[in-house]
Amino acid sequence: MNILKLLADLAATPTTQFENSTPRREALGELRRIGAKTLAAALPLGLGALPTQARTTRTILDSLQLALQLERLQSAFYTRALTAPASFFPADGSIRASIVKMQAHQQQHVALLTRLISSNAAIPALPTYDFTGSKNNTQPALFPNVFSNFDQFLTLAQLLEDTGVRAYKAQVEFLTADNYTLQTALQLHSTEARHAARIRTIRRQRAAVVKPWPSPTDASITVAGKTDVVYATEHATTQVIYQAPTSTGAAGTYKPVPFRLLPIGSGMELLTVSVPEAFDEPLSAEEAEALLGLFTY
């Protein structure tokens, strides 16, 4: 299925057409069954509810540089964790094995991105990382026990992996001119998503309130004004899709996709949980870089 084309078709279809179509009638039937009045109160009705989108103009090289920043930081994070004493990891050996595998993946991603960038530009110097967030003890730490408390390590791992997933998604629109780079980025993106799901599953096994995918029902793990950017626009219930400028001179625009007219999911949480869980939102380069900056000095 070409999901991007499907979203574009939905965004371009007049609402009145949905109102008169069989799917619309089916959707209304579904809504009636689960309580239309309750759901209507939860519907996102205005563009003010739309998530912030990346709207700057970036080059392919810009996007690759951002990806390299992300992968380097994650690689360093897991490498540092694997130097901790054996007692840092749970008795279940599969958990440490997962961290070993993810660290290997990140190293491979760094090698690939370095090769892609080096053919066109100089590779930036490797920054210094402080995963406590204290910037080398110049400010209060966000994760003071990140490499001595395994649950705190998992919390930061989830924040970093979810940031990676959303940051890759935001760069897709800037990579469409080069099929090879676009395909490569999507392959890296899917691996990041699997890492995030594995970290979330481990946390869930350790009694954290979290699903294997981002959900409005997840217990908050962010710090206001610091790491809350990771999920600030993640749980939108209205999606948007970019429509490029036309040959007649019309400017590019972001249009909402009318998911509220479709029978997605079921039950009382149709639009408050099911739709936000079904779609990851992009994280702009500026937001991703701000998050990475918390652990770099």
Image (tube, rainbow, N blue to C red):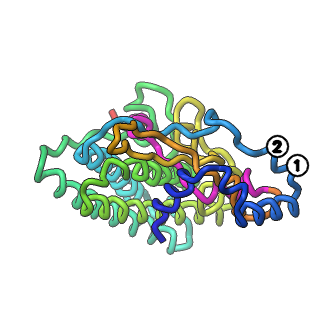
In the depicted view, which residue is nearer to us: 264 or 292? Answer: 264
In the image, residue 64 lies at what x, y percent?
27, 49
Rounded to the nearest whole Å, what is the CA distance between mark 2 and mark 1? 7 Å
In the image, residue 281 lies at what x, y percent?
53, 49
Q: Is residue 91 above or below residue 155?
A: below
Label 2, secondary structure: give it: helix
Question: Bounds of the magenta span?
Answer: 269-293
Label 1, secondary structure: give it: helix
The reply to whether residue 296 is in sight is yes
Q: Which residue does the image show at 50% across and 60% down from the upper left?
A: 196
In the image, residue 131 lies at what x, y percent?
42, 42
Q: Main secondary structure of the magenta part?
A: helix
Left or right of residue 83, residue 142 in this image: right
Q: Which residue does the image show at 49% across and 48% down from the upper left?
A: 241
Name the residue beneath numbered marker 1.
37
Left or right of residue 82, residue 144 in this image: right
Q: Amino acid at mark 1?
A: Lys
Res 181 quadrant in image: bottom left
Residues tagged 2 and 1 counted as in contact (Cβ below 8 A):
yes
Q: Which residue does the image show at 49% across and 41% down from the upper left?
A: 254
Q: Amino acid at mark 2?
A: Ala
Left or right of residue 237, residue 31 in this image: right
Name the residue beneath numbered marker 2.
41
